[in-house]
Image (tube, rainbow, N blue to C red):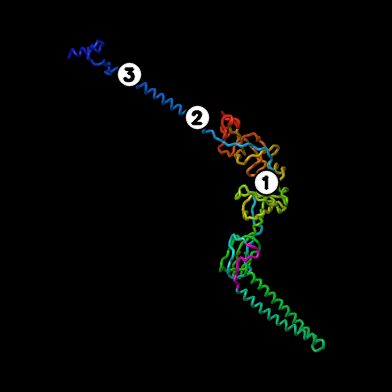
Amino acid sequence: MATELNETTMTASGHQAPPGTPPAVSRRGLPAIAWIALAVLVLVALAAIGYGILQRSAAEHTLSKQTDAAAVQTVAVTHPTAARLTPEIALPGNVQAFTDTPIYARTSGYLRRWYFDIGAHVRKGQMLAQIESPEVDQQLQQAQANLKSAQANLDLANTTRTRYVDLLKSNSVSKQETDQAVSGAAAQQAGVDAAEANVRRLQQLQGFENVVAPFDGIVTARNTDVGALIDSGAAGSASSTGSSPKELFHMAAIGLMRVYVPVPEVYAADVVDGRRAYLTLDAYPGRRFEGTIARNSNAIDPTTRTLNVEVDVPNPKGELLPGAYVFVHFRVSSEHAQSANGIATNQPVTIPSNTLLFRSEGLRVGVVRNGRVHLQPVSISSDEGAIVQISSGLQPSDSIILDPSDSLAEGQQVQVAGASGPAQRAAGGSGQ
């Protein structure tokens, strides 16, 4: 054992080992090849870590570039048009039927039948409803009997008068008796006239049992039904039952519509009877309804300082409805348009109304210059709804943003839609 230990020691100390001895062992007891393998593994791990760091750095850089590119808003642009709009104003108006009236009963009774409901188009003279009024029928029969009695008395009085007049010629009767006979005949004639008038009155009341349309139009309301008690008269007048009668129907003539517009005093001189005007309303986008200024009040309302103007608009298809809210467009002189806006229109341009930005500091449009947004102040000198006329601040070569977002800010970087490289720079630059 001592000899083997010495040989091992000698081998560990560097002396030549006899054949069959194991490989040299480090002072720590690990083979040298293990240290080499460990070093190789460490180098590989370091290389992998370095490669991963480089890959992540490249990915972060690419993502940063993509994020920066995505943060640049893409906008569509248009260019102002060097043109002048015809000066006009658009004012709110209220549409009314040319003729609008309630239909009341003129005789009392019960409703037998109605023929038309709401929305029905009726012609003048068409029967709307029938009323049963037995009291009126009986009164008419009594009046006709009274008339016959009065006519019989008149015939007798006329015969008596004729006889007395003939007898007076031979002095067979006195003058007094003759005068009484003549006066009696005249009184009987007056009685007949009164009886005939009463019959005619009751016949007219009986005729009112048929409720007819007073004009061509549509039925906008029906406020009665079969069997309903009908009181004659108009609203507010008490009937024999002590109740106030109500309207049976309501009719409107809509073939021609009236539109009443309060026109500001500054434009009163431009509103002339016979001039043309046109209507626009939300129910028919893009449509215009032509009308004519029919009349005006010829007086300024001291409360509102406006002139009440009536515009008549043909409505053959019934597209305009009573009560509709519309805008009435009037042509006005350029001087009034400029004075009303307080601006001069020397070199105007027109732009779409969907390019406007309404900010607290005033009206703005977004202009793209060198890839950056400039919020240009503008003033409207004329407004036609979809197109507005700008008095100053814009040139036909400017690129203005369509449908700008409310968050659009001064100096914001943007990209013009459909443009890249030289084309983009020609449209306003990339801003790089």
Label 1, secondary structure: give it.
strand
> What is the distance, in whole Å, between disc 2 and disc 1 at their CAs?
51 Å
Q: Position of residue 347 (x, y in %)?
A: 69, 37
Q: Which quadrant would the N terminus be assigned to in this image? A: top left
Which quadrant of the structure image shows residue 96?
bottom right
Disc 2: which residue: 65
* Residue 386 or residue 166, whichever sits in front: 386
Horizontal side of residue 55 vs 40, given as left or right: right
Q: Residues within 10 Å of mark 1 (few under 14, many from 20)?
A: some
Q: Residues within 10 Å of mark 2 (few under 14, many from 20)?
A: few
Disc 3: which residue: 36
Q: Position of residue 339 (x, y in %)?
A: 70, 42
Tell which residue pokes out farthest to the left in this image.
1
* Residue 63 or residue 169, whichever sits in front: 63
Q: Is residue 115 above or below residue 343?
A: below
Disc 1: which residue: 89
Label 3, secondary structure: give it.
helix
* Residue 40 or residue 308, whichever sits in front: 40
Q: Is residue 237 visible?
A: no
Which quadrant of the structure image shows residue 232?
bottom right
Mark 1 is on which residue type? Answer: Ile
> What is the distance, in whole Å, between disc 3 and disc 2 at their CAs?
44 Å
| Span highlighted in magenta in the image | 122-133
Label 2, secondary structure: give it.
helix
Q: Is residue 425 magenta?
A: no
Which mark's residue is nearer the viewer, 2 or 1? 2
